[in-house]
Image (cartoon, rainbow, N blue to C red):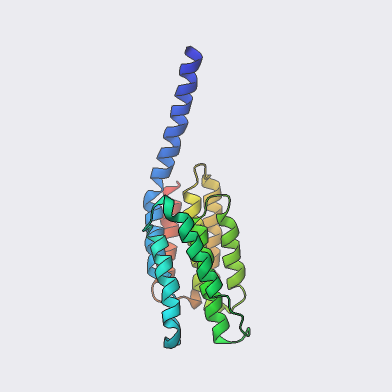
Amino acid sequence: MRKTVIILSIFALVSHSIRSQNKKYEAEKAAITDFLIKHIAFRDGNPTHQEAADEVNSFLIKVFEKQYTVDQIPDLITQALQLFYKNSIGEFDDSPDFRRMTTRRSMCFLALAFLSDKSRYLTFLADARNTLNNIEDFANSEMLLIVNMVELYKTLGLEFALKSSIKDLISRYQDDLKSKEQYTRNNFAAEYREILSKILKSLQ
């Protein structure tokens, strides 16, 4: 009986620790979500292509806002793959169409990463980064920084995310910002930096 009580007590302590950690990062994850929703929209330089961009924009916003139930995730993954296929037309590397298609494909990978479990999301984030690295710095910088934010959101949601690992990620993201800030618009960099700073502070 005593052994059973000890085991149950340990289990209760571990469960409480996990719940406390997940709850601790809820505010940080909400701030990241707000950032993603505000900055994810891809504005095409050519108005004739904006409708296609908006189709991907609205889907990503729906995913980031979590306007769905767990049971609907497989259908959303199918929709993301369909959008990816729709935006997989090959173009010349130096054409505006190549840049817009590449950006929209990377957004599909972001959706798949956000919807995926811990065994899969890193693969989709890597795909998003590799895709974006095919276009110029001025066209990919904000989206690459957004990939970082999706990775941070997913990391904060892990049950046993180590503080040291989160700090290492944030350090890398801060370095990324330094190299890409000149290509960002409006308050993007300031908001990005503030989120990272607040999370670092919460880890003290």
Query: Residue 87, percent across and down?
Result: 54, 75
Against 194, residue 89 (above or below) is below
Query: Residue 105, percent across and down?
Result: 54, 72
Q: Is residue 185 visible?
A: no
Q: Nearer the viewer, residue 126 or 172?
A: 126
Query: Residue 138, percent across and down?
Result: 53, 80
Against 150, residue 164 (above or below) is above
Instruction: Place residue 106 in its image quadrant.
Output: bottom right
Left or right of 54? Residue 164 is: right
Query: Residue 15, percent across and down?
Result: 44, 33
Q: Is residue 108 visible?
A: yes
Looking at the image, how many numbered discs can be counted on the residues? Answer: 0
Against 155, residue 192 (above or below) is below
Instruction: Place residue 67 in its image quadrant.
Output: bottom left
User: Residue sitting at 58 percent across and 75 percent down?
Assistant: 88
User: Residue sitting at 45 percent across and 72 percent down?
Assistant: 56
User: Residue sitting at 42 percent across and 87 percent down?
Assistant: 47
Q: Residue furthest top?
A: 1
